[in-house]
Amino acid sequence: MRKTLILLFACFGTMMSAKAQNWGGGVDEKDFNFGFTFQVLSSEYKTLKTRDWRDPYYDLTQNPPGAPLHNGFRYINAENKVGYGLGFVVNKRISKHTDLRLTPTLVFNDRILNYQFMRDESVADAPARAAVKQVIETTMIDVPLSFKLKSDRRGNFRAYMIGGLKYSMDITSAKKRSNEGKTPLEMLLQNKKNFLSYEGGLGMDLYFEHFKMSPELKYSSTFNSILEHDNNNPYSAPLNKLMLRHVTFSLFFE
């Protein structure tokens, strides 16, 4: 009787192990599989300023320039801002441990720069404009193309690394960010509409009976500056470069 019970438990364990190995709907064995993703991300500028960024700013549209529009900056710094994304997944199986992934995503995210002016009573209304927050509202289409390097599967768990390139396109209305008809100090900071980033991260595949869920943490940064230079704009004139960095947490369902 004892031997029979041991044999039954062994058979049951083998059956459960085999069932567990089939969880995920066989998604890893398919040449192509599809899914969707939800994202929460934090964005921040990396600012590189010009040598004379603290100097007073003169309206260059006037000839000759009159009194300075401000008495210089105390600081210019970036602020973290949380955004959200929704997208889908196209996954191509290359080998047992390698996939190629395309994950187009619609991202809603703002970017923020804070400007602190020097106060000077000789400059008209200086106290009223001692600080300015430039909020760049964006709606982006991100198209990352990545390689996914996977570990061996252990039961219903697998770890992975991911890295690749991301093309981003801003589809925000140009009219919404236009500086037409605005005075210099009312102008908005302008960013490029299209840019390329590199990215890399870590994640894990968690297998459920009919699908796979993958939490993933990823870092990305633009290759080049996304600043649209305009010396007639007092908010872009003191900046040499603006790099954009993201930290993104994603949940993938496949």
Image: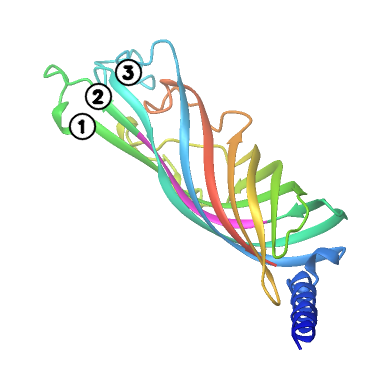
* Numbered circle sitting on residue 117: 2
Residue range highlighted in magenta: 104-113
Task: Answer whether residue 111 is magenta in the image.
Answer: yes
Q: Secondary structure at mark 3?
A: loop
Mark 2–mark 1 distance (CA, rounded to whole Å): 7 Å
Which residue is label 3 attached to?
A: 57
Question: Where residue 35 appears, x then y in whole percent?
Answer: 70, 67
Q: Main secondary structure of the magenta part?
A: strand
Q: Secondary structure at mark 2?
A: strand
Q: Secondary structure at mark 1?
A: helix
Q: Amino acid at mark 1?
A: Arg
Q: How many residues crowd mark 2 within 10 Å: few (<14), some (14–19), many (20+)?
A: many
Reading the chain from its start, which is encountered first: label 3 or label 1?
Answer: 3
Q: Amino acid at mark 3?
A: Tyr
* Numbered circle sitting on residue 129: 1
Say whether residue 232 is left or right of residue 27.
Answer: left
Q: How many residues crowd mark 1 within 10 Å: few (<14), some (14–19), many (20+)?
A: some
At a point 76% along the width and 61% down the height, the residue shown is: 90
Tally the marks.
Answer: 3
In the foreground, 47 or 174: 47
Question: Where residue 143 appears, x then y in whole percent?
Answer: 68, 50
